[in-house]
């Protein structure tokens, strides 16, 4: 669907620029935005490498195990089907930690690994389990204490205070997680009846 929508938008944009006499501005904005995209990518790459490296170091130490123990009550409450599977609990925990640190790029492969492990436990391979559903909702809401990617973007674009969004991000992600999990739990509860 998007492969049809984007070409239409591009054709409309070029047509409008030609008929309104703004073709020169369109050309200059294309080259400026290309340059900005490369600069932003380089800035984000450094941030992503730093935090992914820290996650790898944390994974090699006992820190992940300690953080998993802290998150265990929440994991057992949200994922009762996975209470006995310590490996899945660790994978869910690592995904949650990556999200909390604002490392969406590190959280994605960790989340896929956790889903793959949960799928192994799934008796109906073509249907999501309740734990898988809750995990998707929790992962999508992505509670963040340190929104590193957004801070890096704001910093690269010259924000005077790139960390000013931290408190609003806390409120937004916590509200999204609570609302999403509440709705998911209600669906799970009523689907059993």
Image: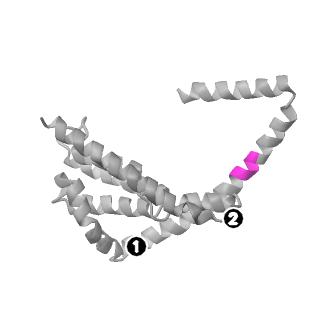
Q: Which residues are magenta?
A: 33-37
Q: Where 4 falls versus 139 (above or below)?
A: above
Q: Nearer the viewer, mark 2 or mark 1?
A: 2
Give the total number of marks visible in the rendering: 2
Disc ID at residue 138: none
Give the residue at x 36% y 77%.
61
Predominant SS along the magenta part: helix
Residue 103 appears in the figure: no
| Mark 2 to mark 1 CA distance (whole Å) | 32 Å
Give percent across and percent down for residue 73. Answer: 22, 64
Q: Where 56 falls versus 174 (above or below)?
A: below
Give the residue at x 71% y 61%.
158
Magenta region includes residue 34: yes
SS state under label 2: loop
Q: Where 138 falls versus 164 (above or below)?
A: above
Disc ID at residue 58: 1
Crowding at label 1, few (<14), some or many (≥20) Cα neighbours within 10 Å?
some
Disc ID at residue 160: 2
- Do the numbered discs 2 and 1 sit on residues whose CB atoms are within 8 Å? no
Seen from the viewer's position, the closer of residues 169 and 109 is 169
Magenta region includes residue 145: no
Give the residue at x 29% y 43%.
183
Seen from the viewer's position, the closer of residues 192 and 40 is 192
């Amino acid at each position: 669907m998007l492969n049809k929508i984007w070409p239409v938008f591009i054709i409309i944009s070029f047509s409008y620029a030609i008929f309104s006499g703004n073709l020169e501005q369109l050309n200059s904005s294309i080259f400026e935005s290309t340059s900005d995209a490369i600069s932003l990518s380089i800035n984000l790459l450094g941030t992503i490498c730093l935090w992914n490296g820290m996650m790898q170091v944390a994974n090699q130490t006992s820190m992940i195990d300690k953080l998993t123990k802290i998150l265990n009550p929440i994991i057992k409450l949200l994922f009762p089907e996975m209470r006995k599977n310590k490996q899945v609990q660790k994978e869910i925990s690592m995904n949650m930690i990556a999200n909390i640190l604002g490392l969406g790029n590190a959280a994605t492969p960790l989340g896929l690994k956790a889903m793959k492990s949960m799928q192994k436990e799934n008796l109906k391979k073509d249907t999501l389990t309740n734990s898988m559903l809750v995990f998707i909702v929790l992962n999508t809401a992505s509670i963040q204490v340190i929104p590193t990617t957004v801070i890096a973007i704001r910093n690269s674009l010259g924000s005077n205070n790139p960390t000013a969004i931290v408190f609003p991000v806390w409120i937004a992600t916590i509200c999204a997680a609570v609302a999403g999990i509440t709705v998911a739990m209600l669906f799970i509860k009523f689907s059993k009846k």
